Amino acid sequence: VQLQASGGGLVQAGGSLRLSCAASGSIASINFMGWYRQAPGKQRDWVASISSGGSTGYADSVKGRFTISRDTAKNTVYLQMNSLKFEDTGVYYCKSFGLVEKWGQGTQVTVSS
């Protein structure tokens, strides 16, 4: 499995961004997809995840603001981020779970206050 994340950028507080994570390779082996983020000097934290059945989960800090979704035809998982806050700043990573766990490369999200 290979994962390609994109969609990061610089946005003002209160703004929105949509991240994408395109999967290729052994797609059928993927059970869950997740988004994580790492702020400068901090550990990498879970943000949201979606199962192959479409069940979703969110960290408390992003509930009501972020939405994870998927387009199975495009083998892509999205993270719609609304009402962004300064503390959402960080490098966002997607990760696949299945026979093999795989990280994508990060995409930088910077929220200016």
Image (cartoon, helix red, strand yellow):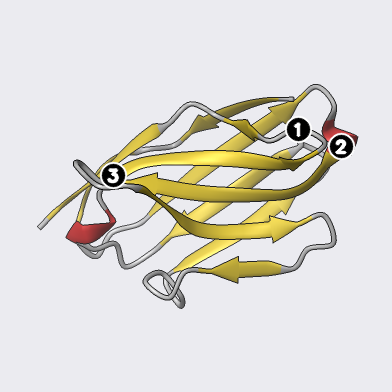
- Determine whether 105 is above or below 68 in the image: above
Q: Earlier in the sequence, mark 2 or mark 3?
A: 2
Residue at image coords 82%, 36%:
99
Residue that mark 2 sits on: 29
Query: Residue 28: x, y in percent?
Result: 90, 37
Q: Residues within 10 Å of mark 2 (few under 14, many from 20)?
A: some
- C-alpha gap between disc 3 and disc 1: 25 Å
**Where is mark 3, residue-wise?**
90
Q: Tell me residue 92's x, y (percent).
A: 41, 42
Above or below: residue 20 compared with residue 53: above
| The C terminus lies in quadrant | bottom left
Please, what is the three-letter code of the amino acid marked with disc 2? Answer: Ser
- x then y, percent, for residue 107: 40, 33
Q: Which residue is disc 1 drawn over?
A: 100
Mark with earlier residue (3, 1) = 3
Q: Are marks 1 and 2 in contact (CB under 8 Å)?
A: yes
Number of numbered callouts drawn: 3
- Looking at the image, is mark 3 or mark 1 nearer the viewer? 1
Residue at position x 43%, y 31% from top?
Answer: 106
